[in-house]
Amino acid sequence: MATEQNSSDEELMERYRDGDAGAFDLLYGRHKGGLFRYMLRQCGSRSIAEELFQEVWMNLTRARRTYTVQARFTTYLYRLAHNRLIDHYRSQAGGVPVSFEDDDCPALDSIAGGRRDDPALSADHRQQAERLLQLIDALPEAQREAFLLQQESDMSVEEIAKTAGVSRETAKSRLRYAFAKLREGMQEFQ
Amino acid sequence: MSEIFRDEETGRDAKLAALYRTAAREEPPPALDDAIRAAARRAVASRPQRVSTSFIRSWRVPLSIAAVMVLTVSLVTIMREEAPEMVLSPGGLPGEADHKRAGPAADTGQSATAVPKTLLPHAQRSDSVGLSPPAQTGSSGIGLRDNRVAPDPAAESRKDMAAAEGKVQSKSEPVSADAALRETSRARVKAAPAVQPSASPPAASMAGATQPRADLAPEKWLERIEDLRRQGKFDEARTSLAEFRKRFPDYELPASFKEWAGP
């Protein structure tokens, strides 16, 4: 079991491809939280996020036979998620958000209303966390995606670019703008 | 947010990142976890079936070839046992068998002594190559051995006629083995729609043994007769020519035929 825990994502995915269902359980356990939060923040609705989240994993199980290690597993997984998300945007009235097409980032607009309450956090810390999540929600989708990919799966700029299907410069720009806006929004706590 | 550690390239803020990790703790509902894990297990569990499918697919061609070979060997073995001369003789061509079959049937005017000489090989050969019409073989489930009796109705009718003349009994003794075989299958032959009783002997032979020759052009027929002569089968050639003359009385024979067949 210890060796299973130490196995890389790519090894686990290869084992699942070869018929090891236990490897999938490990993979799922490692990435379910990050992927779910990515979906939740990107589509803004818990029910839709759950649906899209499930579809991404189902797409992964269907595509397992053709899986070969060409990049980090997280890049592969979040690429599936990104594509599914774009399909979801297309099915909506508003279509794909402009921020996914523009390399230039718009100014920070309004900020969404209050959110959850986590007893594990101190009052001040909780306030900061709520504010941060509000600011994240308010980010343009493309910048938010870049931020979430980095935070939830620890991707490099290159991996973010590959996942989002953009150039490295674009990915880097999105990240910089995202952090700049978040810092700006959090200045009241400094 | 007093301490801010920034990545110069991306502007990454370590403090913001740490704050995000403590704030973002949403997880998918357990029911969804279970559903996804179960679906993943099912997807893997369906794998052996695909493996067996590919196993069948990969063995389909070799198995088909093996089956064809077994059938071929079986048929050749049966043919060797049933009609060895057909397998070994170079003269066992379908067209030749046609002539052999037509010969005695058309020669009903001759004495019954011609019957044992031509009937036996003819019956074996023509049946072995499957020239006999299926309608004469009785039920559809009858195999090779049953086909053997197909041309027999003509011979049988002729034999019956000869028997009425009191000649067949002694002359047909050399074919007793084949006659015994015919006796065993006679019941089936009688059950089949054999030669019309009202047909004349030549007509009966045409309806039975020489049915394939109905479409044969006179020139082609004469060529076959010449082939018979070249093979030294003069009796059969004469018999076939006699039938030819009955069928085409106005056809002028080539000079080469007149030399041996007369005017």
Image (tube, coloured by chain):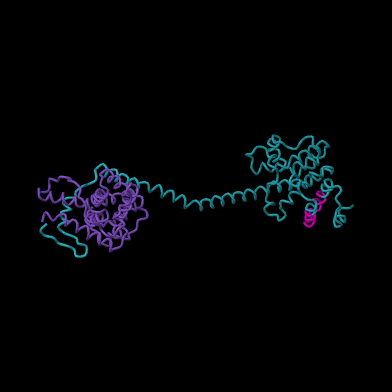
- Which of the two residues, A97 or B189, is positioned nearer the viewer here? A97
Q: Main secondary structure of the magenta part?
A: helix
- Magenta-span inclusion, residue B70: no
* Image chain in cyan: B
* Image chain in purple: A
Q: Is residue A27 left or right of residue B247?
A: left
- Which of the two residues, B180 or A119, is positioned nearer the viewer here? A119
Can see residue A98? Answer: yes
Report the residue that reaches farthest toward the bottom: B8
Position above or below: A2 against B106: below
Q: Position of residue B49 (x, y in %)?
A: 40, 47
Quarter of the picture containing the N terminus of chain B is bottom left
Q: Position of residue A35 (x, y in %)?
A: 26, 51
Q: Position of residue B25 (x, y in %)?
A: 19, 48
Position above or below: B4 against A16: below
Can see residue A60? Answer: no
Q: Is residue B251 left or right of residue A55?
A: right
- Which of the two residues, B243 or B168, is positioned nearer the viewer here? B243
Which residue is depicted at the point 38% across and 48% down?
B48
Q: Is residue B162 left or right of residue B19?
A: right
Q: Position of residue A47 (x, y in %)?
A: 27, 43
The residues colored magenta run B223-240
